[in-house]
Image (cartoon, rainbow, N blue to C red):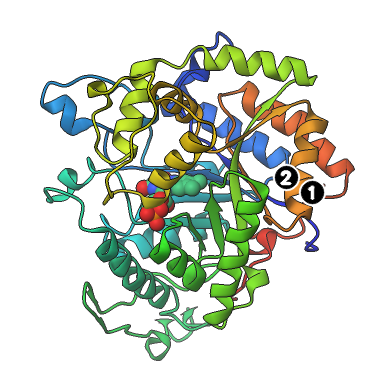
Amino acid sequence: MTDNMMRLAMFLFPGYHFGAWRLPEAIPDVDLNIDHYVRAAQLAEQGKFDAIFFEDQAAVPRSNNIMKGDHFGGASPRAIHYDPSMLLPALAMKTTHIGLVATSSTTFNEPYNLARRFSSIDFISKGRAGWNLVTSFNENEAQNFGMDALTDHGTRYERAGEFFDVVAGLWEGWEEGALTRDKESGVYFDTTKMHFLQHEGKFFKVRGPLTMDRSPQVRPVIFQAGSSEPGRQLAARTADVVFTEQPSLAACREFRDDIRRRAASFGRDPNKIKILPNFMPIVGKTDQEAKDLHARMRALVPDDLALGWLMQNAGGLDFRDYDLDGPMPDLPETNAGKTMQANIMNIARRDNLSIRETARYFGETPAQRLIGSPSTIADLMQEWFEGGACDGFAVSPPYFPAGVEDFVHLVVPELQRRGVFRTEYDGTQLRDHLGVETYR
Ligand SMILES: Cc1cc2nc3c(=O)[nH]c(=O)nc-3n(C[C@H](O)[C@H](O)[C@H](O)COP(=O)(O)O)c2cc1C
């Protein structure tokens, strides 16, 4: 694919918008219904998307509060989902080209398990697997893994760096041609082409190799989405694709330039790293129709749910002790996600939002929203893309199925007509779609 084309990843997360799943036309049980996921994946493939993407947190948000009897804001639709690494093989069997990306945390996994899981998916999908590497920010996850609290932010990233090195080493543990399966000689594989990683570091001791040959892409594609200082360093050194949430074209361009500069300092080709800002499209046949749909969705966001989310992500303040119609107070330094906390404050200050309004804003999505007719949405996407702010987009439809269908049936053809998005896949592997480094 030529490099004047956008890359698009579809973010499939059923309750992402806290209100839209309540629309009469929405199907909320996409969360645990494999048939709906298959339909969504096939729709995204019909739209020639590079990949579908699944986020993950290994805990019900606000579990610790609920356990203590504080049920306020605890029934988040974002809580209900599969382990996405189990979803990918099922979707691989029902699609042929689209990339399949799942989130897995370096804080709550062992590198050997994770490496073989994603290698397996890469084989099953014939080279379409991607891993979204996260360090985790949800304080409720730690208690599911033998910890009382999250380890500190810097340590999580230090572990993530070593975790990646082990995983990448394991993925290259078998030389090309190692598996002979030679009936004549009876030699199944050539043991001289099987390499022991013998890793011994601060966090991990791993011998290797994996129980598999090198996978079709050798390395499944690495996605990363932390934007703090250590998050950017890790992305610049290891990621093929970086997701981000940025408030404006200028901020996104600055972010992209920064990641590209850092990547070059690690000796990498900056053109092989794709920066995809996340946005939520709200599509109508006309701009007015889209605005009306947005108003309907927004009115369905429950205040307590949105406030519960804000309390978890803003760094521990209990906003019930505050005047909800007053301004957002300054927030204490957080050990959870630093970028999310910064985004919350930037938006609240920029738009002069009260606590309640901030909660409602983020209850829709932390991402940029693009509201309008297909041509209005395509204009904005083109402006960001051609303005050097990004290499494409993570698209987060607010609900299923119309949110996915409208983007695929109305916006994608508009982008294709403008010559900024593919009309056919060129290759069959995710690294080829994205135009990132290959290891074959
Ligand atoms: C589009 C997008 C998707 C993300 N998905 C996840 C996810 O599925 N699970 C998770 O724990 N964090 C997720 N994150 C959060 C980051 O990957 C990162 O772990 C978090 O922001 C903390 O890192 P930071 O302090 O460097 O920002 C996502 C962030 C963005 C922008």
- The residue singled out by tag 1 in the image is 421
The residue located at (75%, 34%) in the rendering is 377
Q: Secondary structure at mark 2?
A: loop
Quadrant housing residue 56: top left
Q: Percent position (x, y) of residue 292?
A: 67, 13
Position of 275 compared to 84: left or right?
right
Identify the mark at residue 5; answer none if there is no mark: none
Q: Identify whether 400 is placed above or below 425.
A: above
Position of 257 compared to 167: left or right?
right
The residue located at (79%, 32%) in the rendering is 376
Tell me if I can see residue 101 in this picture: yes
Q: Percent position (x, y) of residue 438?
A: 61, 73
Q: Quadrant of the N terminus?
A: bottom right
Sequence order check, earlier mark of 1 and 2: 2
Q: Are marks 1 and 2 in contact (CB under 8 Å)?
A: yes
Identify the mark at residue 48; answer none if there is no mark: 2
Position of 373 compared to 29: left or right?
right
Using the numbered discs, state the Cα–Cα distance from disc 1 to disc 2 in whole angstroms: 9 Å
How many residues crowd around disc 2 within 10 Å: few (fewer than 14), some, or many (20 or more)? many
Q: Identify whether 427 is placed above or below 346.
A: below
Quadrant housing residue 132: bottom left
- Distance from mark 2 CB to nearest ligand 1 atom below 8 Å: no
Residue type at tag 2:
Lys
Position of 226 compared to 435: left or right?
left
Q: Percent position (x, y) of residue 327?
A: 39, 28
How many residues crowd around disc 1 within 10 Å: few (fewer than 14), some, or many (20 or more)? many
Q: Secondary structure at mark 1?
A: loop
Q: Nearer the viewer, residue 343 or 117?
A: 343
Tell me if I can see residue 96 in this picture: no
Residue type at tag 1:
Phe
Quadrant housing residue 403: top right
| Residue depth check, mark 1 versus mark 2: number of the one nearer the observer | 1
